[in-house]
Amino acid sequence: MDYVIAFLVGGAICALTQILLDKTKLMPGRVMVILVCLGAVLGAIGIYEPFSKWAGAGANVPLTGFGNALFKGIKKAVDQEGFIGIFKGGFTASAVGISAALIFSYIASWFFNPKMKS
């Protein structure tokens, strides 16, 4: 049942994001920033943590989960190190995910012909 819930929640987040992209003139980059900020804000007010425990990977994999991870990292670093934690915490909490995205996108560029859209 955990897989079904994760699939449905992740699919719902993706479907809502696709509707947002289709029905507005927002560019994809701005929508991505909105999702990350939404995850951070929902984490800050205490809503995202119980939601992610219930939904599992369906809530943690999309960009809203990334925003929540950034918030949790910053909160932990600020509690431990004070003001400097604002700048360190997000990088510490998300370093593996960011590194994986960079490495796999670089590997993908070996097999495909990357170019800017005109």
Image (tube, grey):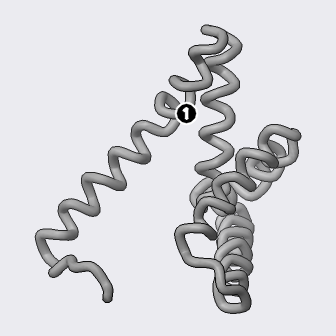
Residue situated in front as seen by the camera: 88 or 10: 88
Image location (x, y in percent) of residue 46: 86, 39
Q: Is residue 88 above or below residue 110?
A: above
Image location (x, y in percent) of residue 67: 64, 48
Going 40% across and 46% down the picture, which residue do you hit?
Answer: 98
Q: Is residue 11 above or below residue 95?
A: below
| Residue identifier under label 1 | 90
Going 68% across and 62% down the picture, which residue do you hit?
Answer: 34
Going 64% across and 14% down the picture, which residue do you hit?
Answer: 83
Residue situated in front as seen by the camera: 54 or 29: 29
* Quadrant including the N terminus: bottom right
Image location (x, y in percent) of residue 117: 31, 85
Going 59% across and 50% down the picture, which residue do you hit?
Answer: 66
* Quadrant including the C terminus: bottom left
Question: SS at mark 1?
Answer: helix
Residue situated in front as seen by the camera: 58 or 45: 45
Q: Amino acid at mark 1?
A: Gly
